[in-house]
């Protein structure tokens, strides 16, 4: 049996070359500071206070580098602890940080089950790790114990339906190639994979791409020795059982039943999210934020006009141009596409979003009556927010 450490030492994940840091920054969810602020702190975190963060199971460093680099670029102070079992993954993450001159990170080799030994943290990132523990509940509990009051968790765990086809192959390869070293397992599995017929659920699932991206991707997807997905009810139960509460999914729209059907409107929210997962059938990972059970937490709102709005993944001038000419904003979600429609009158607000001015200031600069502006902000928030395209944060405001 190949242990988790042996696996990630042989194939550090994701496969990254530190030289690439010179030409691009990989961004995503969770752990983009704007998204963290919006999801965990109602868009109102005081960024003059240093952020103490733990990146638990940081791998080759995608979430780590994103967090450290964005805070550095925003000239915000941070103390970030990277923790991973794999020394080889750590070497790559360290080289990436060095290539960027990021000096706010302390690197540790160890288990996230010991997270509290490294201190307490305002923010914990744990992306793609908890589903690889033999007892995921122990991981959730350990991270909860390492959280400072007022803090929150950004995480990703696998979801079953979008990974349809993965588990039969993982089980078959696991049985057939048990006892082989990682490189021999990879070679044998790649050969056998070619013989898997077209009708296999894996081959019919267009969302599965990691096996084509790299050797590390193939190994992680199809040869993992410890991997369990969570359905929405299983995830909510796990959070509940380990002292956490869901703050929100990174893209709440995916879990919004009303985006799919008018039926079930009177069901409890948890049931509606579970049904949306079943009806969509394509969710591969749950990316979400959680706060301690019982913590005071609320979502940010356009009613608080002192908040600073941001557009993410959409350029303000391009969005304003489309909206002012009556065109919808296109949204592509894997195989699904949606058209997001806003009133043309929202264009002057969209055009002025710069990550620094508050909604009140933008409305004033656009010469809009505050009541009209409030209605338009409400529409922008309701249309773009569920898809992670509209966030509140004072990260860049001085
Ligand atoms: C799939 S990779 C994800 C890496 C990174 N978080 C990302 O999203 O790119 C999983 C990582 O978790 C690490 N890992 C697994 N179990 C762990 C544990 N108990 N404590 C710390 N790290 C662990 C592995 O060594 C590996 O680097």
Image: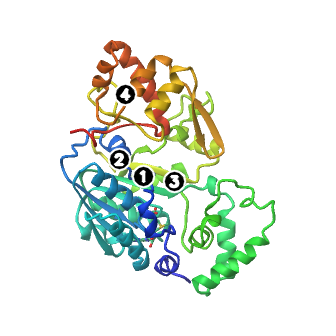
The numbered mark, 1 or 4, whose residue comes first in the sequence reads 1
Report the residue at 73% width, 72% height from top: 193
Q: Distance between the residues labelled 2 and 4?
A: 23 Å
Mark nearest the camera among 3 and 2 is: 2
The numbered mark, 3 or 2, whose residue comes first in the sequence reads 2
Using the image, tell me which numbered label, if any, was put on residue 284: none
Q: Distance between the residues labelled 1 and 4?
A: 26 Å
Q: Is mark 4 on a helix, strand or loop?
A: loop
Which quadrant holds the C terminus?
Answer: top left
Q: Which quadrant would residue 209 be assigned to in this image?
A: bottom right
Mark nearest the camera among 4 and 3 is: 4
Which residue is denoted by mark 4 in the rendering?
352
**Label 3 near label 4: C-beta < 8 Å?**
no
Using the image, tell me which numbered label, if any, was put on residue 36: 2
Q: Residue furthest front?
A: 23
Is residue 321 in view from this perspective? yes
Mark nearest the camera among 2 and 4 is: 4
The numbered mark, 3 or 1, whose residue comes first in the sequence reads 1
Q: How far apart are marks 3 and 2 (CA)?
A: 23 Å
């Amino acid at each position: 049996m190949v242990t988790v450490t042996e696996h990630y030492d042989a194939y550090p994940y994701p496969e990254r070359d530190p030289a690439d840091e010179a030409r691009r920054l990989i961004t995503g969810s969770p752990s983009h500071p704007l998204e963290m602020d919006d999801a965990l702190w109602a868009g109102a975190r005081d960024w003059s206070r240093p952020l103490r963060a733990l990146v638990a199971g940081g791998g080759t460093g995608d979430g780590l580098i994103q967090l450290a680099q964005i805070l550095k670029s925003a000239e915000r102070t941070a103390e970030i602890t990277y923790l991973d079992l794999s020394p080889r993954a750590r070497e790559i993450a360290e080289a990436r940080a060095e290539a960027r001159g990021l000096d706010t990170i302390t690197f540790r080799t160890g288990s996230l089950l010991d997270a509290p030994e490294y201190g307490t943290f305002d923010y914990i990132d744990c992306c793609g790790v908890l589903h690889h523990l033999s007892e995921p509940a122990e991981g959730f509990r350990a991270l909860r114990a390492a959280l400072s009051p007022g803090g929150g968790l950004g995480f990703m765990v696998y979801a079953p339906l979008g990974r349809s086809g993965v588990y039969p192959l993982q089980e078959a390869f696991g049985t057939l190639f048990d006892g082989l070293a990682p490189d021999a397992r990879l070679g044998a599995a790649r050969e056998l994979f070619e013989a898997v017929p077209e009708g296999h659920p894996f081959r019919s699932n267009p969302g599965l791409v990691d096996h084509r991206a790299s050797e590390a991707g193939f190994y992680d997807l199809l040869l993992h020795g410890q991997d369990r997905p969570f359905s929405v009810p299983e995830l909510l139960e796990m959070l509940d059982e380990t002292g956490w509460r869901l703050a929100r999914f990174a893209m709440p729209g995916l879990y919004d039943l009303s985006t799919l059907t008018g039926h079930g409107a009177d069901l409890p929210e948890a049931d509606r999210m579970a049904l949306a997962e079943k009806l969509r059938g394509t969710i591969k990972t749950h990316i979400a934020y959680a706060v301690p059970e019982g913590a005071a937490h609320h979502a940010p709102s356009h009613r608080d006009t002192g908040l600073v709005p941001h557009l993410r993944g959409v350029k303000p001038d391009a969005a304003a141009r489309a909206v002012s000419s009556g065109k919808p904003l296109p949204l592509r979600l894997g195989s699904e596409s949606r058209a997001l429609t806003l009133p043309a009158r929202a264009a002057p607000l969209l055009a002025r979003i710069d990550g620094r001015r508050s909604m009140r200031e933008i409305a004033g600069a656009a010469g809009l009556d505050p009541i009209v502006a409030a209605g338009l902000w409400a529409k922008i928030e309701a249309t773009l927010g569920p898809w992670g395209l509209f966030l509140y944060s004072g990260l860049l405001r001085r």
